[in-house]
Amino acid sequence: MPRRSRSTATESVSFIEEETHNNSDNEDSKEFFTQTQFTFSQQPADRSQNVDLARDSENKKLEDLNPTTRNKIVTDLSRMLLFKALGMKDPIDRTKVCAEASGEVKGVSKSALNEADKRLKDVFGFGVKRVNSKMEENLPARFKNRLYLINEVVDDDEGTHSLNLHSAHQECMTERGLLMVVLSFAFCKGTSAVRSGQMKGAGKKTRWITEHHLYSLLHRVDENIPSEPPSAEGRKKSRTSGGGRHSLGGGGADGGVSETPDIDGLLEKFVSQDYLLRDKIEEGDESAGTSEDGKVIAYAMGPRAAMEVGRRQVVYFCSNVLDEQPDPTMLAEIDEDDESSEEEEEEGGEEVAEEPKKRGKRQKRG
């Protein structure tokens, strides 16, 4: 999912929904249309980290390679990043893609990644990013090696660039619409209470919503969505089918296919793409579908959603839908995290600047 560049200015985008009506009391009456305009505030996504800069020695090693070899490594790496992020929509494992692109050439992975980052930014407007430092410390270790492509091109109010880039056809819009609703329920209806789960690090401030609570809320949005999550057998069948649209309510009035999505299949998809986190946590209410180990499945906003959509956007989205003011407590929490991340980035930058000086002093003494 694309995002706008970080900006302090608040923008908005409007959508117009048209409905056709018939006056059944008057045989001579004709159809007429009503329009409802929805306006949503456009907020910046959560902060992200740039990829680590290579040392001068590694940059020189890449520069000293045969021009054909050097260009092939950077080009292959750029293509892999694009294909995985846009085509497969999979999280990118930094070690794997760098090793695959470098082949037998060793010791140039960071330098090649820096060059690929520059090329993607210059040609496509994408930035190669890591998880926000504040969020990274509250996630399992595997996320420290993840890379994501973030769209940094400033879009217009109609989202023309995003629509052209992502070919927002009906099924794509259904999936993204569901993701936004799930993120809203998880962040605004979930709880951040510390509870024992496998994902220990994400239990401090991350808001978790149990799958039973999530399905109950989704059922209120669309009555064709079951109010309870599927059984183990139904879950397995849903996931092997890959998710997607299917008719739960017998289709529309015109005999078409219902737009109600396969919820469990798409939740699995969102987890695999890092848009959602999933864990088994302890839940005080034993009647809420606890398993034999006394735990329930729960979902939370994933790092990719934080960087592409952002917690602030979710808060404002909910307030726009409900026609209320955004929750000041949630906004204050986000601002606090942003300030902490800025301080850590500044400290990290000072450490990086000091490192060459220290290496220079050691070499001089030798």
Image (cartoon, helix red, strand yellow):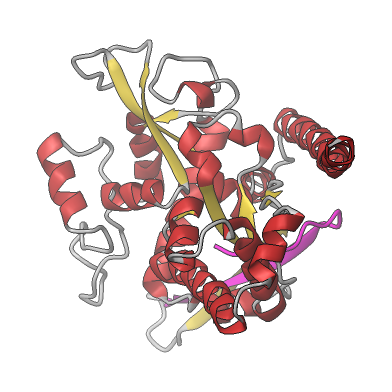
Residue lying furthest front in this view? Answer: 366
Q: Quadrant of the N terminus?
A: bottom right
Q: Position of residue 48 (x, y in %)?
A: 68, 48
Q: Quadrant of the C terminus?
A: top right
Q: Nearer the viewer, residue 300 or 89?
A: 89
Q: Nearer the viewer, residue 206 or 251?
A: 206
Q: Nearer the viewer, residue 38 or 49?
A: 49
Q: Which residues are magenta?
A: 1-23
Residue 14 visible to the viewer: no
Indicate left or right for 246 with 197 as reference: left
Query: Is 5 covered by the magenta stretch?
Result: yes
155 versus 68 height, above or below: above
Q: For the point 73% across and 52% down, which residue is it?
A: 55
Q: Position of residue 350 (x, y in %)?
A: 87, 38
Indicate left or right for 57 with 31 as reference: right
Toward which corner of the image does residue 42 lie, by quadrant?
bottom right
Q: For the point 42% across and 52% down, which residue is it?
A: 273
Q: For the point 15% across and 35% down, which residue is it?
A: 231
Toward which corner of the image does residue 5 lie, by quadrant?
bottom right
Q: Position of residue 147 (x, y in %)?
A: 55, 53
Q: Nearer the viewer, residue 238 or 259?
A: 238
* Number of numbered labels in the structure image: 0
228 versus 9 height, above or below: above
Q: Position of residue 238 (x, y in %)?
A: 18, 51
Query: Is 15 covered by the magenta stretch?
Result: yes
Indicate left or right for 5 with 184 as reference: right
Q: For the point 70% across and 62% down, which residue is it?
A: 59
Residue 267 visible to the viewer: yes
